[in-house]
Amino acid sequence: MEENKLQCSSVIDGNFEEVPRETVIQFKPPLYRQRYQFVKNLVEQHEPKKVADLGCGDTSLLRLLKVNPCIELLVGVDINEDKLRWRRDTLAPFMGDFLKPRDLNLTITLYHGSVVERDSRLLGFDLITCIELIEHLDSGDLARFPEVVFGYLSPSMIVISTPNSEFNPLFPSVTLRDSDHKFEWTRMEFQTWALSVANRYDYSVEFTGVGEPPAGAENVGYCTQIGIFQKNGGKAMESCVSEQHDQHVYKATMGLTMLPRWVLNFHPQAILPNPPKMLKLQVFTTSYPSLQQEKFFKLVLVNEVSQQVESLRVSHLPRQKKQDEEWGDKPKDSKAPGPCFGPVFTEVEKAKIENSPKPFCVGDKFFVPLQRLLAYPKLNRLCANEEMMRSVIADSIPLSSDGSAVVADLRDYFDEQF
Ligand SMILES: C[S@@+](CC[C@H](N)C(=O)[O-])C[C@H]1O[C@@H](n2cnc3c(N)ncnc32)[C@H](O)[C@@H]1O
Ligand SMILES: [Mg+2]
């Protein structure tokens, strides 16, 4: 954080608040990013599977969180449909997500509605975030908020951030930081409210914040105050969640979710046998490709096996070995990675590969035992055992008659060309 002398109005926390004064406090990174990063760190620490961001605005925080591998369901709720619509398409998977699918499924859904209305689709979450939301609620909605979020939705963890009004005198002309704010609380006010809510709904709460005050003004506390609420006794029992009656009040964010054009045009038929051209959905929702989905798992496994077999085959070519020796290189061991681009193995991994059945040639055919392939860490991570590997690749990659090895031609067309 640093103080700058500026002659014009400036931005305090990313909400373009006017500060018509010479001295302006600028946060680096900007305060809104510090808030998002705070949530991201919390997600990395606690690894929640289901996360909802209430008052998600233009979905910036969701965009940051979606790369987190632990999250399987990400939901955004806002009362402002235009904000939800604005950048929602950038939440959809892009080419890289198809080329390198996630380990776990991820669905992202946006709901249009008020956070103070009960909606059963938000039950059973691990984390609910309310970043710079509560100060936008009028007194009636603020009174309903704890009963809905803590009492009804009752997630394992809730994060609430709100301006700390004690910081405001550092921006002397600022009374409220945003014209839509219904209030801004001192630390005492926020903590009194938070402790009373936590006690009522059996949560514990810790207080922290982001946006350090400048030197000499430490007593005002963080610019943004944050409460982290954790449910006593941990996660809600699944049975409790399923006993709740369905109650859907959030409206659809009308529109169409499309798969990117390149998927429709270029994806192999084997992967998307009947590529959907357009999906009409009641709410905006998008699903990411993952290794939990059979077609993507198969794509990745077949690709990895093919690459490994090819690398081993090239290492076996007598001409290649001879050339390497002539050029003074050590003869290539079939297990060894390429000098520049291959993976780097630990000693344990090297030993595992070395001790596995070796590739061999019969005539002009090159055989790589599946057990050998399974010794490579990448393939081992994908496949539990030989049987599984065989069943997934059998209709895509030639196998030996007993199914225990991949078979390839020792020489291919390109070997003769170059
Ligand atoms: C200051 S913005 C914060 C946006 C986002 N959380 C962020 O940190 O960038 C407050 C958001 O709360 C939304 N909001 C206000 N009242 C709401 C309500 N009752 N239900 C849902 N969203 C609400 C507003 O539309 C707005 O997008
Ligand atoms: Mg605000």
Image (tube, helix red, strand yellow):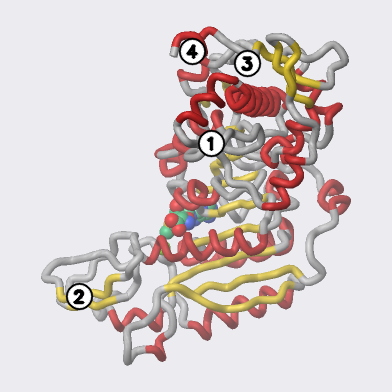
The answer for how far apart the CA atoms under marks 3 and 4 are is 11 Å
Task: Report which residue position mark 1 lands on.
Answer: 338
Three-letter code, disc 4: Asn
Depth check: 67 or 317 in front?
Answer: 317
Three-letter code, disc 1: Gly
The answer for how far apart the CA atoms under marks 2 and 4 are is 52 Å
Three-letter code, disc 3: Leu
Ranked by sequence position, the earlier of labels 3 and 2 is 2
Task: Report which residue position mark 4 lands on.
Answer: 265
Task: Report which residue position mark 3 lands on.
Answer: 272
Query: Which quarter of the rendering shows the C terminus?
Result: top left
The quarter of the displayed image where residue 343 is located: top right
Q: Report the disc number at residue 4.
A: 2
The answer for how far apart the CA atoms under marks 1 and 3 are is 33 Å
The answer for how far apart the CA atoms under marks 4 and 1 are is 34 Å
Ranked by sequence position, the earlier of labels 1 and 3 is 3
Say whether residue 408 is left or right of residue 391.
Answer: left
Ranked by sequence position, the earlier of labels 4 and 1 is 4
Q: Tell me residue 385's x, y (percent).
A: 83, 34
Q: Residues within 10 Å of mark 3 (few under 14, many from 20)?
A: few
Q: Are marks 3 and 4 in contact (CB under 8 Å)?
A: no
Residue drawn at x 72%, y 9% is 363
Would residue 299 be visible to someone looking at this image?
A: no
Say whether residue 239 is left or right of residue 398.
Answer: right
Disc 1 element: loop
